[in-house]
């Protein structure tokens, strides 16, 4: 049985004092304790469940860690590619190398020898 303890609170007004009876504290006893224990158990089970609990959090953290490593590797590759682009734009030796090796070009009067295996 739920018991409510009451206390009287008085508020002063211009005309008269009005007495209000407010519930001060509820005593839940055995039923309240059991309900609290059941709720606590449900919360612990939810926390440990493989679908949404701690294992899932750890799995997501591991995925995040791997993605952060991938991002670092891609950032390093992007920086290397930026450096290569700058070299291609401004370095005559690099431009000549690309023209000779990738575009099979030669300067006038040069003889190009191709070897096959």
Image (cartoon, helix red, strand yellow):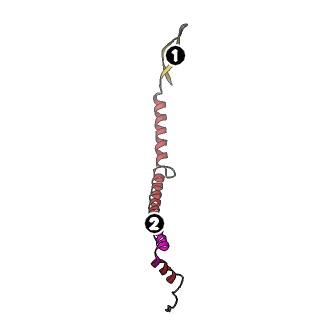
Q: Position of residue 91 (x, y in %)?
A: 46, 75
Residue at 47% across, 67% down: 82
Q: For residue 69, which quarter of the picture?
A: bottom left
Which residue has dot 1 on it? 21
73 or 97: nearer the viewer? 97
Label 2 SS: helix
- Disc 2/disc 1 C-alpha distance (Å): 74 Å
Q: Residues within 10 Å of mark 2 (few under 14, many from 20)?
A: few
Which residue lies most toward the front here? Answer: 108
Q: Position of residue 1 (x, y in %)?
A: 51, 25
117 or 48: nearer the viewer? 117
Q: Is residue 115 above or below residue 98?
A: below
88 or 47: nearer the viewer? 88
Q: Is residue 22 above or below residue 32?
A: above
Which residue has dot 2 on it? 79
**How many labels, in total?**
2
Residue at 48% across, 31% down: 32
| Residue stretch in magenta | 79-92
Which residue lies most toward the right here? Answer: 15
Residue at 52% across, 89% down: 108
Q: Residues within 10 Å of mark 1 (few under 14, many from 20)?
A: few
């Amino acid at each position: 049985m739920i018991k409510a303890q009451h206390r009287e609170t008085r508020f002063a007004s211009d005309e008269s004092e009005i007495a209000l009876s407010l519930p001060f504290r509820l005593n839940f006893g055995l039923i309240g304790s059991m309900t609290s224990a059941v709720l606590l158990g449900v919360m612990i089970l939810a926390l440990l469940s493989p679908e949404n609990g701690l294992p899932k959090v750890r799995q997501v953290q591991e995925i995040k860690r791997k993605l952060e490593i991938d991002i670092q590797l891609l950032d390093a590759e992007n920086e290397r590619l930026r450096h290569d682009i700058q070299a291609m734009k401004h370095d005559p030796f690099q431009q000549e190398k690309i023209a000779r090796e990738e575009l099979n070009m030669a300067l006038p009067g040069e003889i190009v020898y191709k070897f096959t295996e």
